[in-house]
Amino acid sequence: MEQHSRTDAYADRYAARAAGMVPSEIRALFAMVARPEVVSLAGGAPYVSALPLDAVGRMVGELVAGKGAEALQYGSAQGDEQLREHICEVMSLEGVQASAEDVVVTVGAQQALDLITKIFVDPGDVVLAEAPSYVGALGTFAAYQADVVHVPLDEGGLVPSALRETLARLRAQGRRVKFLYTVPTFQNPAGVTLTTARRAQILEICAEYDVLVIEDNPYGLLGFDGEPMRALRADDAERVIYLGSFSKTIASGLRVGWVLAPHAVRAKLVLAAESAILCPSNFSQLAVREYLATQPWREQIKDFRELYRTRRDALLESLDQLMPDGCTWTRPAGGFFVWLTLPEGLDAKAMAPRAIAERVAYVPGTGFYADGTGHRHMRLSYCFPEPHRIREGVRRLAGVVEQEIRLRDTFGSTTGGSSTGVQTPGPGIV
Amino acid sequence: MEQHSRTDAYADRYAARAAGMVPSEIRALFAMVARPEVVSLAGGAPYVSALPLDAVGRMVGELVAGKGAEALQYGSAQGDEQLREHICEVMSLEGVQASAEDVVVTVGAQQALDLITKIFVDPGDVVLAEAPSYVGALGTFAAYQADVVHVPLDEGGLVPSALRETLARLRAQGRRVKFLYTVPTFQNPAGVTLTTARRAQILEICAEYDVLVIEDNPYGLLGFDGEPMRALRADDAERVIYLGSFSKTIASGLRVGWVLAPHAVRAKLVLAAESAILCPSNFSQLAVREYLATQPWREQIKDFRELYRTRRDALLESLDQLMPDGCTWTRPAGGFFVWLTLPEGLDAKAMAPRAIAERVAYVPGTGFYADGTGHRHMRLSYCFPEPHRIREGVRRLAGVVEQEIRLRDTFGSTTGGSSTGVQTPGPGIV
């Protein structure tokens, strides 16, 4: 940041909030990840090539030829009404009863996060987030000068007792807590899922402390076992603001997400959306609407589930076989991510350039904490590479970690310096 | 706003900036405009049905079938590189020399406005804007708690002497002016164009006072006479941030716009874009890219120009023939809008419900001022209705104005109460 300021002739003109927008140190590194010889376990990009592209192409072509006057025109800031009805149908799979009237279509769920933060957060307000938490959310909170306070999670998701302690402490300090941000199901980056018992407890605690809950749920329909989990929103329509996305169940390049909010909040969100983008793209929205109305979308999601399950299995089996002692990792039941913890004294951020030199990439854990911690962790994603590439990637990674362990045993530690603040790593790693 | 607060259980949780997000009083009225019997001279929607929808449909279908893995996937936050190169080619028609490296693709130019305001404006900072100014920009400035100070325009665009006086006054007051926002060519809502001589003067004054210029230019290629005007950005690459859009030259429903900024500012804008939406839609971007690469876009813009010229002529001829004495209006040489001033004592806002009852709609001038003035003005747009409908609309409008004049002559005035602050009227009126 200092270096940046020295060379930026506009530096003294920026708003105070711009200081929270800092490029990631690992960004340059990620430019290398695009090289085909590197196995990237870094990105969170869905495997859109699994879609029936010919059928979708035909559908989109007919949409423009037949309904172009609508698909190519401005729409409402709230989003297409028929699409919002389909969205309610999708959410009902997770037990959510909602009216299309309370849904706002957004440019991916990321924009929903941005709008929510914009209408709720004054500089210095506290936002609670899991430790670790979704890097894109941390970037948004930083852009509005929120003070992110992390609450630990474990294999069962966010830890209720830790949430209660944190809220009690913040109340004693007189801090203003605006909301709890959580990815309860197949969490990004940790791959864990909040248990059913804990869901009730989390809602109870948030009611007790009168804190809103932002439930971010892009992966909810991508579970590998049984029925979808019941959403938090299904059990509290007044306290929970629900974020959904078609990025992982249809296609990320359409940038169609949504937010379901209590009626009064929804009205504010529409005004905020209008001043931010006027309205979401009808072209994208109507493509999703037609897809949901005419294509076998439930079967396609099943196909995605099987595809990602195979890849998760490839990743977990390779980790079991190849990773050196002292490494631990989560075992996701859905979604895209495994969270790996290195042996004591190792530093995933310092190790990243060496891993890329060995042609394997991951996201160092530091990106998922607002407080500069997370050095011993990394996120491994299995969504994009084919299974044989995943196995090859883990083989390379295991070699790098073994070398780090030898280095540590010789020099005591491989730990680099600590980071400061949130660093946006680019959409490549979502 | 008061009524809203009383019924909103979340009112005490919002950020301070949310107070600047106020629904328009005329919003309900605009719900009526969609009725087919109403001639709407209110909307700023382009006439996208003039596009060759079959050809565009085929192009889009082939894009998804052939390049779906790219078109349906996440892209970079800055936007597709080839598209940015095409954008530089488009801007060169207005004398702008730029590198694709300094372009950021946005969700319409509206998002560019939002990101610029986000990185530059602290609450209370001054933003200069023409009087009248684009309603969507005023909404964005309000959402970031900017203090908008208007500078008058006349038939030749923004008045340089008034700009200088305003800047001198603000400097004497010790105010922090962040930028001048201007739509120099075929202005929205006034329909006037900044003369060539004034362009140089405006740049000179802004250099003298060290103020950035935001040049918003969605209509630049839609002039009815001769070659496109030279953009302000063509003569100052360091002080001018240029906003462009394909909403009026291709299709508004794609939501593809852009911002061209000095290098350091561009870097901040990319970070701001990332935290707002991750990345713009590849689906939309690649549709525009393919359109520019494979379709006769220059000829299509010519067709749009002829179409809008015919409609402008229909509007101006009807106004000349039918409007009562005491009304005056601008004579645009391009773009979408005519700005009409009513005789003294008439109030376009108070008159609007009566006009809609007579099946004609316009946008009252008050929406285009941040200070609650503008009651005697209205914006008439000729972009969407067919010429015979425009003529019928003006006939109805003239009847309403005549009636208002009779009312005024009986009761002294038809003026309603004054508005307070900016009111977002919805994307329907752009």
Image (cartoon, coloured by chain):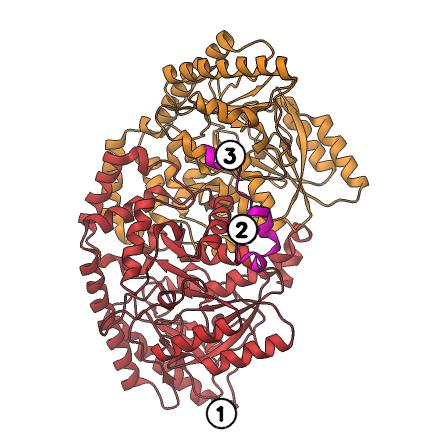
Chain colours: A orange, B red
Look at 51% across and 39% down and name the residue there: A98
On what subunit does the disc labeled 3 rest?
Answer: A
Other-residue count near label 1 (Cα within 10 Å), few / some / many at <14 / 14–19 / ≥20: few
Viewer-nearest residue: B392 or B309: B309
Q: Which mark is residue A83?
A: none
Other-residue count near label 2 (Cα within 10 Å), few / some / many at <14 / 14–19 / ≥20: many
Q: Which mark is residue A26?
A: 3
- Residue B219, given in percent of the width and then of the height, sits at 33, 66
Count of numbered circles in the view: 3
Residue A234 appearing in the image? no
- In the rendered image of this protein, does residue A298 appear above or below residue B415? above
- Residue A110, given in percent of the width and then of the height, sits at 50, 41
Amino acid bearing label 3:
Ile
Residues at marks 2 and 3 on the same chain:
yes
Viewer-nearest residue: B378 or A182: A182
Give the side of residue A43 with respect to residue B50, left or right: right
CA distance for labels 2 and 1: 45 Å
Amino acid bearing label 1:
Thr
Q: Which residue is mark 1?
A: B410
Look at 31% across and 55% down and name the residue there: B88
- In the rendered image of this protein, does residue A393 appear above or below residue A135? above
On what subunit does the disc labeled 2 rest?
Answer: A
Give the side of residue A81 with respect to residue B301, left or right: right
Give the side of residue A305 with respect to residue B119, left or right: left
Foreground disc of the pair 1, 3: 3
Secondary structure under the numbered disc 2 in the rendered image: helix
Examine the image and state in which quarter residue B221 appears: bottom left
Give the side of residue B241 with respect to residue A236, left or right: left
Q: Which mark is residue A269?
A: 2
Q: What segment carries the magenta color?
A: A1-29
CA distance for labels 1 and 3: 73 Å
